[in-house]
Amino acid sequence: MSPPRVVVVGGGIAGLAAAHRFLELRVDAPLELVLLEAAPRLGGTIRTERPPGYVLDAGPDSLISEKPWGLALAERLGLGARLRGSDERVRRTYVVRQGRLVPLPEGFVLVAPARIAPVLRSPVFSWRGKLRMGLDLVLPRRRAAGDESLGAFVRRRLGREALERVVQPLAAGIYTADPDRLSLAATMPRFAALEREHRSLILGLRRAAARRPASGAAGVRSSLFVTLAGGMEELVEALAARLPPGSVRLGSPATALARTDAGWRVALAGGEVLPADAVVLAGPADRMAALVRETDPPLARELAAIDYASSAAVALACPRGAVRHPLDAFGYVVPRQEGVPVLACTFLSVKYPGRAPAGVALFRVFLGGALDPGILERDDAALVALARGELAARLGLDAAPTLARVWRHPRAMPQYDVGHLGRVAAIEARLDALPGLAVAGAAYRGVGIADCVRSGEAAAERLVPRLEGGPS
């Protein structure tokens, strides 16, 4: 009797995590694993270039230590000694205000301030804006049920200035999204819970801080942001090395998925058909929708309804002496109201020492997102010129870059619109009626690397009982 076959469609971090988890759970049982990836390489948006002296991440460059699944996987893969924390001595962020870099008020937690005094001293807000934020202390709870956009939530609790000058650029830096479309429940449920439990966000954050025990974390786990010494592609490389020889098929897009009495059939672009006992769809939701259009039209409609935004990143290096700014932060974010097509800039050589040669400043400028969908229409030279002009205006860069890289991410960031969790619930309900099928990836319950690892591993854990003869 042949061993059960699992087909994973998509070789990004979620698909790789799913494939690896199948092998972990079936370590003492036979299993045939096939991972299909349409592109010529694994990793999806995770990609690292390593020119001499540099480590350049084209996509995500960090794991978040507060979400343990990415760190746990790295350690199981033997990468613990390769983990590196950020330089916590400069753990601060600037925000652009009327063209100048101004420190984000200390204690401002994504959406709301946990401390009043730094906000009162900050030039980020006008006095009217500060007083409007203070109304959060007395405003009643929201009475209406249901989801709410992040933009509507912040305007209601803290006012327009808080949204436009801080929350919008921070949300754009994380989700490349429009806050007036972004689901609060799907992206920042903590703040909805603070309002329910404490009425005031400010009071809730202060009480939470007072209850929080001193962190006992040591080493890299004491840092919020954690990377790998050779860049985040080390995680992809380690996962790929654990997969059985011949199990990965690059340049092999799946074209259709059909149910059979025994399980599933996966059709490939070249005409080959793979029978499978279980299938994980770990590619972008809109592409996975095309695979199930004939098998389950309602599932396909829900998957296709998840929108995506495009972005670009430009890395620039220059002599440290050519930059007038002290670079005493991880970087800065740019509010939309500043009128420039830049989302944010990370000071990579500051955030993670060892990313560039000594005496070199390395930056990564982020462009595009949901509020600037046409950014990828510009050619590479135009994007480099835009990034260079941004650094000249904001940091005083007065020299030509010694290194420049442009990375494009077309339709790479899923948009968690208002009602997103309802759509995810509908997808999961359809999957309950399709034994042996699961989905995984950034489109569902989190966009970070750790979220994708969790999603892929959960998909494998859901399907393994079916391989053993039980219900999935």
Image (cartoon, grey):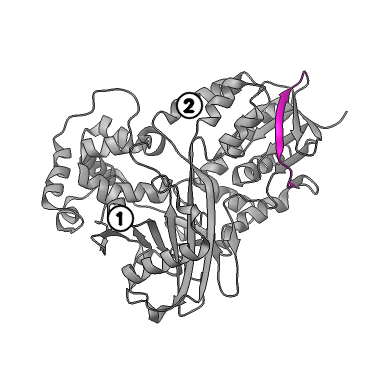
Alpha-carbon distance for marks 2 and 1?
34 Å
Q: Position of residue 326 (x, y in %)?
A: 32, 74
For label 1, the crowd category at 10 Å Cα-Cα, with few meaning under 14, some 14 to 19 and many 20 or more, is few
Q: What residue is disc 1 on?
A: 339
In the rendering, at what x and y percent does residue 358 appear?
48, 79
Residue at position x 59%, y 48% in the image: 73
Q: Give whichever of 26, 141 is nearer the camera.
A: 141
Residue 430 in the figure: left or right of residue 135: right
Residue shown at the point (41%, 69%) measured from the top left:
388
As helix, strand or loop, the secondary structure at mark 2 comes to helix
Residue closest to the eye, 293 or 206 = 293
Q: Are marks 2 and 1 in contact (CB under 8 Å)?
A: no
Q: Which residues are magenta?
A: 250-261
Q: Is residue 270 left or right of residue 296?
A: right
| Tag in front: 2 or 1 | 1
Query: Is residue 271 shown in magenta?
Result: no
On screen, residue 123 versus residue 423, left or right, reads left
Mark 1 residue element: loop
For marks 2 and 1 on the same chain, the one whose residue lies earlier in the sequence: 1
Identify the amino acid type marked 1: Gly
Q: Which residue type carries mark 2?
A: Arg
Quadrant where the N terminus is found in the figure:
top right
Rendering coords of residue 242 (x, y %): 72, 50
Which class describes the residues within 10 Å of circle 2: few (<14), some (14-19), or many (20+)?
some
Q: Based on the displayed image, in which of its 4 quarters is residue 102 positioned?
A: bottom left
Q: Is residue 31 left or right of residue 223?
A: right
Q: Which quarter of the figure has residue 148? A: top left
